[in-house]
Amino acid sequence: MYKQRLNICVFLVLAAAGICLTRLVYLQIACRDESRAQMVHEEVYRPISLPTVRGSIQDRQGRTLAYDSPAFYLHINYRLSRLLDDRVWEAMIQSQLRDDKTRDEVELFLHNEYAKDKAALDQILHLCATIRKCDADDIREILRSTNETIWRLRRHLAWRKKFPDAANIPDAEKDKVLSPSDILKIDIVEMHKGYPVIELKTEQERYQVQVETAGLADVEILPEPKRIYPFGSTGCQIVGWVGPAQPQENALFPEDEYAQYLPNEVSGKDGVERICEAMLRGRRGEVTYDKEGDILDKKNTLFGKDVRLTLDIRLQQKIEQILTDPNDASGTAPGMGVVVMDVASGDILAMVSRPTFDLNRIREDYARYLKNPRKPMTNRCLAEHYPPGSSIKPIILLAGLEEHKITATEVISCPAQAAENGWPNCLLFRQYHSCHDWKWPNFARNAIRGSCNVYFSRLASRLEVPAMQRWLWEFGFGRRILPGPELEPYLRQQIEGPDRFFPESPGIISLEPVYDRSATVQDIPTMPATEKRWFGIGQGNLRVTVLQVANAFAVIARGGVFKNPRLFASDEAPTGDAERPLKIAASSLAVVLDGMHAVVYEEGGTANKVFAGSDFDKRSMTIYGKTGSTERPYHAWFACWATDPSGRAVSVAILVEGGASGARDACPIGRRVLEVCNEFDYIGTPLR
């Protein structure tokens, strides 16, 4: 009996040992990878993101217009900044209220509980205000902005948690349903992070913060990339700027988590910075450490791609200086726009819009710039359109000649008398009771030379409406003509969204603008025949942009070959609609060229007095120009192109808002711009 019991015990022991051994083998072999992963997980810190580095923006000469530079910021953790949020205090009070405690008792308890944190926060606020030389309330506003963002997120999550099947409602309605304590229960990762408050620009400032915040766990100095714009306000509406990225912008990178935006990262908000966001953005890296500080895994940061423009930033800068009135202490000088293009390539060498703003200050001064009635953030060369006045007359003459509605030698009389009702008067008659008939035979080249309204209104009235609109369209009016950058195929869909182009007005060549980029001339609404006479002198409902005028004059300078203007430099050949002969007869072009040459070089030419005595002949430059002015609204124009014996040519268009005379207000600017183009060796022989 004893032996039998012993055998049973031995058997049970062996069985237990076998089970343990089997389990050990299973753990060592079958579950080895899983066990090791669990052990590694327990010994590994959470991956740390490495910041993205945006690509730079450069001009045609390789000069940097925008780049990322490391900057140091004082970060305050939300654990401290939340103490400025009355809603958080109210939520904490409500969560502590009991039957045996009054509200005053709870408030006293919380005041004592957080007295040390509040003192630390006040110390930091005072320190930040001292460094930035501002009031502490300005720093509080920065922290309140962070608090508001986090509170709204917590409120949204509290709503979804409490009413998972309910439709979303406005925040004000949520506040009526949710109590502060409901929101207080929501814990999100954003509540445990620090947020930048001020930039520490010098080593002395960083040292001061380190000394005065020693021992404070919720304050730290962290490096972040900062966007730098070396040329400040020059080209500001083109270069654009960056600001805090919004969650919806992650739609630009739907399948790339390392390109999507983290809190406190920036994205392009305007200009090239916005248009080329998918190119400039880059991808952040990531590094994973174990608890011994060794790197277990690392994904390198991929820098964003650089973007090169056709602009010459030094030329742009010089023209901006020309347009700046040193006597305008009140800041009320007229708005202006200037475009300079290389005729052969269509490259935009300068696109100047005044007034300007400082790209390095835009985030701090955005509200002020936005409210400025002079609209400094608007690109007057692209986004605004204007009646072209007499600058449109060379195109109207070409249309008339090509449609056989006029010959080069046919005279349209301009007598010294008022025009019949509904027709424009000659400017000479209105101002001096004179006329062009007293000066010369009023045929084509002389009508251009003296800018005769009677001639061009009568000529325009002979054109059929569809023919007039077709010729305006062919020269680039009534449509958007500035393309985006050449793209790699994988970026094309991302960047060519509906809002990834410059805010470019198409102008108007009918009764209303047509914004569809895929529209054709057949999509342009027709207009009353009575509009034609006003279109002929650049008035009525006709509207154009400064870029369109510069480009149209470049078309004439090329002998009737249309090209889209180009702002993004590329080695790729232009495609599709980018280059197209308009099949204009050489004889028609010769008439227009003769008239525009007379505008500058012959007595009675509307630009002759400004250019008389110039030294452009010594610079080996020949100028073909046209002045223009409009009424109601009043604006002044000068448009031209210049060529030299080597075949180089530039076209220029200038608009002065509120100007009364193209010859007086815009033409002198045109002369100075041409001199600068020569000095920068884009045309002619520079004087030494």
Image (cartoon, rainbow, N blue to C red):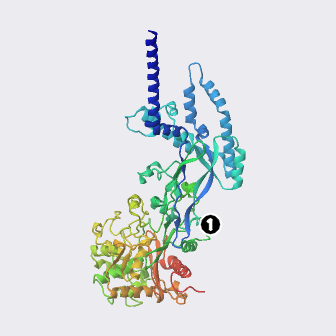
| Nearer the observer, 589 or 83 | 83
State the image quarter where residue 562 is shown: bottom left
| Residue named by callout 1 | 329
Q: Where residue 330 appears, x then y in whole percent?
A: 60, 64
**Which quadrant would the C terminus be assigned to in this image?**
bottom right
Instruction: Please provide percent x and percent y for residue 513.
Output: 35, 64
Query: In the rendered image, is residue 533 in sight?
Result: yes
Residue 411 in sight here? no
Q: Is residue 326 left or right of residue 38?
A: right
With respect to residue 501, does 447 lie above or below? below
Q: Amino acid at mark 1?
A: Ala
Q: Is 519 displayed left or right of 41 in the figure?
A: left
Tell me if mark 1 has few (under 14), some (14-19) or many (20+) residues whose alpha carbon lies within 10 angstroms of its own.
few
Residue at the spot 46% in from the left edge and 40% down from the top edge: 33
Q: Position of residue 499 (x, y in %)?
A: 41, 58
Which of 545 and 42 lies nearest the eye of the viewer? 42
